Image: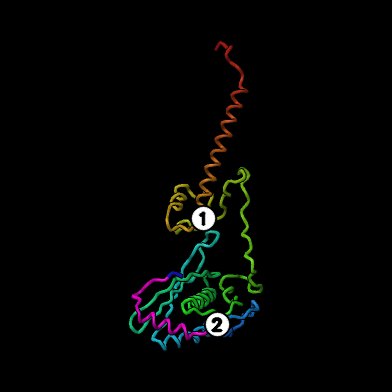
Amino acid sequence: MAIESITVGADLAKALAEAHAEIHNPKTDSENPYFSSRYTSLGACRNAAVPVLAKHGVTLMQDLTTTKVANVDGQLVWATECRTLLVHVSGQGLLFGPLTLPAKEGTPQALGSSATYNRRYSFNGVTSIAASEDDDDGNVATHADANTRTPDVVPKIPQPPVHPMEAPGLPIRPTGQFGYGKKYVHMPWSVMDSSSLEWFRDQANTPPLIRDKCIAELTWRTEDRQKVDTSRALQNEVDSQSAPDDSDIPF
């Protein structure tokens, strides 16, 4: 998480140093029946840290918002953002975040699960709590099937088929919907105009995956035009060679 300084001073630094020396990791207290796993709940983490922070004059607060982010396919999905604020009685403070985590969908249940998962991980990061690692409670926020656990190895993302005219080594043409930008959420890659692709490619805040797909699509179109032009030139050459010689015709 990124850390933003808000008038950090000696009072807050001293209080945090003393508090962190007294905070102990909580015990694993919860079980996720869907994934046959145990984890340390947000409540247990809070009970381990908040009283110690308060003893040294530090209050911990968290702010949650919902947003949308681009997934690996470039499609916008719901997500939660959590910012965590530490405030000392002296008025000094530290703001952490935001930490952004996707949700399976935009329902209250999915967003609530993502928010709880987000708060707990943000909380533990700020307080340096090392909770149980046997932890799959957040999968309910991001996975549709709650009857199978997430595999330890991330599955390989299937790639779209190579265009018949593509030569080995050329970028694979993106398929599906562009899915980025307010006016282009449902725009297919194949009909996205080149000027818009170039605009998204050149913007500093365009996600790297979207930028790479823009570059791949523009490269594919350039290569495709070159193939068509080459094919036409060859056909014109063949046609000119097979045309009858009319130099002896008097008219």
Mark closest to the chain's N terminus, 2 or 1:
2
Q: Is residue 239 magenta?
A: no
Task: Look at mark 2 in the image and give the residue it sits on.
Answer: 41
The local crowd at label 2, few if under 14, some if 14 to 19, many if 20 or more residues have their Cα within 10 Å, is many
Q: Is residue 20 magenta?
A: yes
Q: Is residue 18 left or right of residue 213?
A: left
Q: Is residue 189 above or below residue 10?
A: above
Q: Residue at x 51, y 47 (%)?
A: 218
The image quadrant of residue 240 is top right
Q: Amino acid at mark 1?
A: Phe
Q: Residue at x 48, y 66 (%)?
A: 68
On residue 236, the disc is: none
Secondary-structure class at tag 1: loop
The foreground one among 26 and 83 is 26
Quadrant the C terminus occupies: top right
Magenta span covers which residues?
Answer: 3-24
Measured from the top left, where is residue 76 in percent x and y? 50, 63
Task: Look at mark 1 in the image and give the residue it sits on.
Answer: 178
Q: Is residue 38 left or right of residue 8?
A: right
Measured from the top left, where is residue 66 in percent x and y? 46, 71
Cα distance between the residues tagged 2 and 1: 39 Å
* Foreground tag (2 vs 1): 2
